[in-house]
Amino acid sequence: MELTVQQELNRIVNQYFPDTVLNGLIKLFIADKAEEGSRWFEITRYSHLMLGGNSLQIDRLACLTEWVMLWFDITDDLQDRDNFSKPWMTCPPEHTLNAMLAFPIAFIGEIGELEVDNSRIRSAFISKVSYLLASAIIGQQVDLNHSVHTEQDYMQMIEKRAGVPLQFACYLGYAWLELSEEIREQMNDLALCIGVIAQIGNDMRDILSFDLKNDLLQKKRTLPIIYLLEDSREEFPALAQYYAGEITDEVFLESKLACIQYVQDSGCLEYSRIIQSLYRQRAEEIFTELPLISPWKEKFREITFA
């Protein structure tokens, strides 16, 4: 995050949670995330500017995108039980839980303070934001349930889990602009494509990294893994046996190097790139059709799907 974004997030903490302990804990979370860098602020801001917006509130809205995505990132780590070095993983769990309750409360408060003359627009905005956040949570639950079995299941899941957060970030940028319904739908579709492209890329990288977060070790079914499992019973029995619960983690890890080689030789990465390229092609088509303004549209494309 930019320093100005971190300062704004700290202001939110000071406003709603002046208590020293909780205040300091959430600021610690914010500072830790700032070290990683983030593009959520820019996605919201560029969405606004490239569609002709000039609101004085856009930076505040973009900071709220960062606020919500930090909340989601921490939730993701807690659910997956990884990233153990993070402060929200090392502090007492009841303290982290209290901090997590703080995020949606402050978000609602900040939304309520935004200046909007039209009550109908405000009502529609709140309804849409709630729907998007709920959809992202549903996608995360599907992932946690391990209820993805087919490629169709996977695509539906990542459209919610990865596509919807991008839709949310873009929507905060253009929600109050005077745009046609067609343009709004195009922006919605563009954001969905961008999220899917990014998630497939993440899943491709993950399958080659045998650490605690590896999707294979957690028996997840991502796009490349679904491809792998189709013929694994014949070509690499250890993988099929592991997913069927016929062998333990320890036994499966004995074939780690052979598994990495199987991944590289199987064609699963090439297949995943093909699916990814279809979404990228669609994103390019939508992007070309939209009436966007330079230089903001180029900046938006550069940090999303370029």
Image: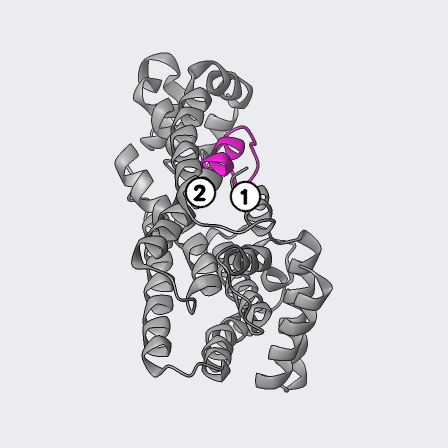
Q: Look at the image and tell me whether residue 126 can be seen.
A: yes
Instruction: Please say if 208 is above or below 142.
Output: above
Instruction: Identify which residue is drawn at 59% across, 56% down.
Output: 42
Q: Is residue 210 magenta?
A: yes
2 vs 1, front mark: 2
Q: Quadrant of residue 194?
A: top left
Q: Secondary structure at mark 2?
A: helix
What amino acid is at disc 1? Arg
Q: Secondary structure at mark 1?
A: helix
Mark 2 near mark 1, Cβ–Cβ under 8 Å? yes
Instruction: Please say if 6 is above or below 266.
Output: below
Q: Which residues are magenta?
A: 200-215
Q: Which mark is residue 301?
A: 1
Q: Nearer the viewer, residue 283 or 144?
A: 283
Q: If the image is split into quadrants, where does the C terminus sit?
A: top right
The residue singled out by tag 2 in the image is 287
Q: Nearer the viewer, residue 78 or 299?
A: 299
Looking at the picture, how far across and down is residue 103, in whole percent? 51, 73
Circle 1 Cα neighbour tier, 10 Å, few/some/many (<14 / 14–19 / ≥20): some
Instruction: Identify which residue is drawn at 56% across, 32% down.
Output: 210
Q: Mark 2 or mark 1, which has the lower sequence index?
A: 2
Instruction: Please say if 174 is above or below 149.
Output: below
Q: Is residue 69 magenta?
A: no
Looking at the picture, how far across and down is residue 78, in whole percent? 50, 58
Looking at the picture, how far across and down is residue 47, in whole percent? 50, 56
